[in-house]
Image: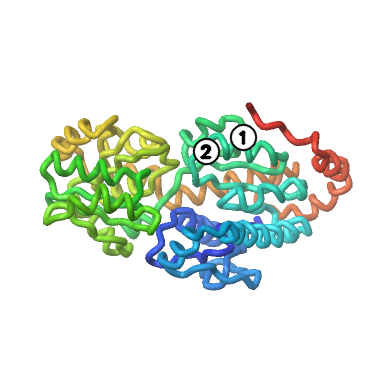
Amino acid sequence: MKIAMMVRSFLETPVPNDIAYSPATVAKVVAEGLHAAGHEVTFFGPEGTSLATHVETCSMRPFFSTMSDFDAMVSATDLFTDYRFSLADSAMAGNILDRAQAGEFDIVVFNHFESALALAPRYPTVPIAYILHDFMDGPRVETINQHSSPNQYFISISNNQRRDAPDLQYAATVYNGIDTNLFTLSEEPEDYLLFSGRITPNKGVKEAVQAAIQSNHRLLIAGNLSKQDMWYFDEHVKPYLDDKILFLSMLGREQLVKYYQKAKAVLMPTQWEEPFGLTAAEANACGTPVIAFKRGAVPEVVEDGKTGFIVDNSAEMVEAIAKVDLIDRRACNKRVFENFTKEIMVENYIQVLQKIVAQHTGSGMPGVSTSSTRAQNYAKSITRISKLLRKDSFRSPKK
């Protein structure tokens, strides 16, 4: 297959070290995995983007290279700051879709549907796949329905992610996978708990702090703190920092893995519908049990009683901490190798992208370039194009 892929037009991949951004991390692994499997992958991103695939920048530059620069942009009151993000994404997405329509790519993969959603109906011959990285709430679903067209396919990263958007044109659910070479099993933990993630209300740092205090355990907090969430840190985390509650700030990959390996457990008191939860897979790969709130995809990633405990509230989290030593750390590692490796993820993406190409073009020959098939069918598409461009051809948003 000839595949074009894009995450963001204004943020390079891999992202700068002090920025936490899972979609780019996953996209890099997928793109390089597809490339290693023999597919022609063109990865689009601004200058600074560097992958093992062919990379194109469309002469665009990143908007920021540090977390502080990002904070300065998103905290600005000028609405034009927000427009810049969407305008840049639309420009790059338009370039990709034009080239796909000309037969250069068999399929286009976007990691954020908003980058191409409004453009997609204008390219009915181009199969477009969106990897969904966010919680699918009402406004998102309504917006997708307003711009729906037969050539747009959705790939969820958990089954729970579909809960509030059951009627999208899903192609498959593909779980995120990690590079297990980076996460080594450790069966000799130390007596501390770990929280790893963005310092934000959604991630439940406050609840992790309280659980550690109530269970009389040390808690190490590793994560990215943005200016927008400084109030939360100052109110719910900073007052409790001492020799037992420590804030490590953002850690590099190698440092984080060492803390994973030696942690007694990783706490995930998530306060939102977590679409996947890479932290759980990373911790389990090191043999470390995960104690998590029952939200989002947690029950799909953490096996209750086997690789950690799934709880409903802080009181249950404290109880789970007391019995976490019952968890077999080798079982945690084994489950990741059986379900959440990058190899499994890449193979699943190969299958689903081939399925989309074959279904959309009617070629019946997944894995084979379909540009000639698309050209032969172009005349038949003229009627579809005119229908799709009429206002009444779009599906009405669900009330």
Task: Please say if the residues under marks 1 and 2 sit with CB atoms less than 8 Å apart.
Answer: yes
* SS class, disc 1: loop
* Quadrant (top left, top right, bottom left, bottom right) of the C terminus: top right
Q: Nearer the viewer, residue 197 or 228?
A: 228
Of callouts 1 and 2, which one flags the residue occurring earlier in the amino acid sequence? 2
The residue under label 2 is which amino acid type? Met
Q: Provide residue 66's location: percent of width, then percent of height.
A: 43, 68
Instruction: Name the residue at the front extreme.
Output: 77
- Identify which residue is drawn at 44% across, 62% down: 71
Q: Residues within 10 Å of mark 2 (few under 14, many from 20)?
A: some
Q: Provide residue 117's location: percent of width, then percent of height.
A: 66, 47
Residue 18 visible to the viewer: yes
Q: Nearer the viewer, residue 306 or 170?
A: 170
Residue bearing the label numbered 1: 168
The answer to whether residue 84 is above or below residue 187 is below
| Mark carried by residue 135 | none
- Identify which residue is drawn at 35% across, 49% down: 200
Q: Nearer the viewer, residue 25 or 85?
A: 85
Residue 266 left/right relative to 368:
left
Q: Quadrant of residue 230?
A: bottom left
Residue 262 left/right relative to 33:
left
The answer to whether residue 194 is above or below residue 164 is below
Q: Provide residue 81's location: percent of width, then percent of height.
A: 56, 61
| Mark carried by residue 136 | 2
The residue under label 1 is which amino acid type? Leu
